[in-house]
């Protein structure tokens, strides 16, 4: 896929009525209403999934694969379930029905992302003590954080934990093991992640630290959960075959990563607004005595991802209970740890910059302010922009497409340009 | 380009808003990230000092391609011994401010460390004016 054109969120045009719900809620002001339909500005989208959650018409969708597209495409297919998947089912006490159910659905093998999370946790523990990343280290498992830092907090880029995510490591690791076991060529093995969120999908398409993803597909928890439910009957609900311990599974709940890493001098926050506040504080130098900052866009962590089905707090409670029955993690050998570090250094994104030339940027900023001051300041959204300020910005930067303020119809955008 | 703001004394709900606005401007104008970080730290500390020690004041920020000049002017109590105030760990912050996590005595030392030029004009009973200059490609963190 062409990365330049990649938009993580996809609009089902016929279902969209242009109601502005998504636009008003988007935390990065990446949505406009044009010609009565929502339009996502690719370069500003952080793929948090807020629009998917709030759209009353279910017109916003994540770009994910469908199960039938990935099952049967490879000679051998491995399911990589996100930890959040285990918390989706009211009727089970352990994760066994989930893991066994995935096989029944047609996967040849199941490899827990939680297992890879435990390896990443151990590496992070070591990094904190011996690595060269300036503290506080900012965790990067939530791709929304990564995208937001590139766009709005580029000065924090050096603080990012430059490790591949557990999902990416799980794909590399399980493919290697499966290739050895089956004798199949690595390219005949498909690794499919079962994702709680659209950001994870976006992160394989335009990955920030990884040059080429090892994943072959991403399907949503929302699609998998009901299909799993249907095949779970009769599977023994007892902890059985080798599994990750609670440390790896706990990553699904905010705070779980810091706990697994074993760093108590941490700040943990979840939800877009809190996340932005913490990044502001980091930028202002307020958290200089903290060692680790764990942020997730969803509350309370990935169990609240936009592609899950269960209520996030119920799922979290269920997962916690499930984790009490876990034994210690069963070590899986031969994790390709030498392959854990990003091979790319993320560059700052320039989307917030008004112009390449500083003097021209200043002129534009003055014009934006003058125009915004002349608008009613109601932020009503009728013009198709989320705020009067955004309308003014669009007009001056030429993004406006001729939209008008309903209170000042005498001011079509092209006149103020 | 020039912007002016008011900082409100002892108002911990608004505290940080002015430095937030200045950061948004710096990002919109496209200054380099390392400079934004230094500007963020220095403006935040200077703003908080006006909130905590000086019952508020005014901020004037001038932006040009060569430098950003931030003037924080207050009519507070002034600083009696500036050498002492510039020392790391020295603070007269009130009990309330300390309970809110301020009063480490690190604000002024950090402002000096992260700025490219710093001028402090202070007189007991009259007020304090800090002039902070930050240049792209200046001092590194
Ligand atoms: N604008 C000001 N007006 C009056 N006194 C000030 C002002 N700014 C600083 N001071 C004095 O200088 C001292 C040192 O300031 P500094 O910012 O270094 O530390 P602090 O504000 O006490 O603590 P911190 O900044 O770590 O929260 C203050 O405690 C106060 O006595
Ligand atoms: S918190 Fe988890 S589920 Fe939510 S966007 Fe981030 S990675 Fe995805
Ligand atoms: Mg201070």
Image: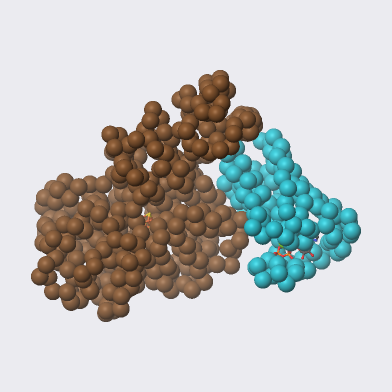
**In this structure image, what is the colour of chain A?**
brown
Image-based side of B32 in relation to A220, left or right: right
| Residue located at (64% from left, 58% from top) | B13
Image-based side of B109 in relation to A137, left or right: right
Camera-side residue of A224 and B103: A224
Q: Is residue A221 visible?
A: yes
Task: Give the quarter of the figure containing the N terminus of chain A.
Answer: top left
Locate residue A324, reporting x and y percent.
30, 78
Camera-side residue of A131 and B21: B21
| Residue located at (44% from left, 46% from top) | A25
| Residue located at (89% from left, 58% from top) | B125
| Residue located at (31% from left, 42% from top) | A57
Image-based side of A292 in relation to B44, left or right: left
A6 vs A401: above or below = below
A342 vs A3: above or below = below
Q: Which chain is cyan?
A: B
Furthest-front residue in view? A407
Locate residue A96, reporting x and y percent.
18, 71
Task: Give the quarter of the figure containing the C terminus of chain A.
Answer: top right
Rendered image coloring scheme: by chain
Locate residue A64, reporting x and y percent.
26, 47
* Res A12 → quadrant: top left
Locate residue A237, reporting x and y percent.
17, 74
Q: Quadrant of ligand 2?
A: bottom left
A393 vs A177: above or below = above
Camera-side residue of A349 and A34: A34
Q: Is residue A417 visible?
A: no
């Amino acid at each position: 896929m062409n990365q330049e054109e990649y938009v993580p969120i996809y609009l089902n045009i016929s279902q969209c009525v242009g109601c502005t719900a998504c636009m008003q809620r988007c935390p990065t002001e990446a949505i406009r209403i044009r010609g009565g339909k929502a339009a996502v500005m690719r370069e500003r989208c952080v793929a948090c999934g807020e629009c998917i959650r709030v759209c009353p018409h279910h017109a916003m969708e994540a770009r994910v694969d469908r199960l039938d597209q990935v099952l049967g495409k490879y000679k051998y297919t491995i399911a990589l379930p996100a930890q959040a998947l285990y918390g989706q089912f009211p009727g089970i006490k352990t994760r066994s029905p989930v893991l066994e159910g995935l096989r029944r659905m047609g996967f040849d093998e199941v490899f827990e992302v939680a297992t890879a999370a435990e390896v990443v946790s151990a590496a992070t523990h070591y990094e904190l003590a011996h690595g060269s990343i300036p503290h506080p280290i900012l965790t990067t498992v939530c791709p929304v954080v990564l995208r937001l830092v590139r766009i709005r907090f580029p000065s924090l880029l050096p603080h990012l934990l430059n490790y591949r995510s557990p999902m990416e490591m799980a794909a590399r690791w399980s493919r290697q093991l499966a290739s050895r076991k089956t004798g199949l060529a690595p390219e005949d093995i498909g690794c499919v992640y079962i994702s709680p969120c659209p950001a994870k999908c976006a992160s394989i398409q335009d990955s920030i630290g990884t040059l080429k993803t090892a994943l072959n597909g991403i399907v949503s928890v929302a699609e998998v959960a009901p299909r799993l439910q249907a095949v779970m009957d009769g599977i023994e609900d007892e902890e059985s075959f080798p599994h990750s311990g609670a440390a790896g599974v706990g990553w699904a709940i905010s705070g779980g990563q810091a706990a697994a890493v074993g760093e108590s001098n941490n700040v943990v926050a979840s939800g877009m607004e809190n996340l932005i506040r913490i990044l502001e504080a980091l930028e202002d130098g307020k958290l200089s005595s903290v060692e680790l900052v764990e942020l997730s866009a969803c509350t309370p962590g990935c169990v609240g991802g936009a592609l899950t089905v269960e209520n996030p707090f119920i799922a979290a409670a269920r997962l916690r209970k499930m984790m009490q029955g876990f034994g210690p993690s069963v070590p899986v050998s031969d994790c390709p740890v030498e392959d854990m570090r990003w091979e790319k250094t993320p560059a700052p994104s320039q989307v917030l910059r008004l112009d390449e030339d500083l003097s021209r940027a200043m002129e534009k900023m003055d014009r934006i302010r003058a125009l915004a001051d002349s608008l009613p300041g109601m932020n009503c959204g009728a013009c198709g922009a989320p705020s009067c300020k955004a309308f003014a910005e669009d007009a001056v930067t030429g993004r406006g497409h001729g939209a008008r303020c309903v209170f000042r119809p005498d001011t079509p955008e092209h006149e103020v340009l | 380009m020039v912007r002016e703001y008011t900082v409100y004394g002892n108002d911990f709900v608004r505290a940080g808003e002015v430095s937030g606005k200045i950061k948004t401007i710096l990002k919109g104008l496209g200054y380099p990230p390392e400079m934004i970080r230094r500007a963020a730290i220095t403006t935040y500390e200077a703003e908080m000092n006006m909130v905590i020690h000086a019952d508020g004041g005014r901020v004037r920020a001038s932006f040009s391609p060569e430098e950003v000049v931030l003037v924080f002017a207050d009519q507070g109590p002034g600083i009696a011994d500036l050498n002492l105030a510039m020392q790391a760990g020295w603070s007269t912050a009130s009990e309330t401010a300390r309970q809110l996590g301020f009063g480490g005595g690190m604000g002024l030392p950090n402002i000096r460390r992260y700025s490219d030029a710093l001028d402090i004009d202070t007189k007991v009973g009259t007020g304090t004016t800090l002039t902070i200059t930050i240049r792209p490609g200046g001092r590194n963190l």
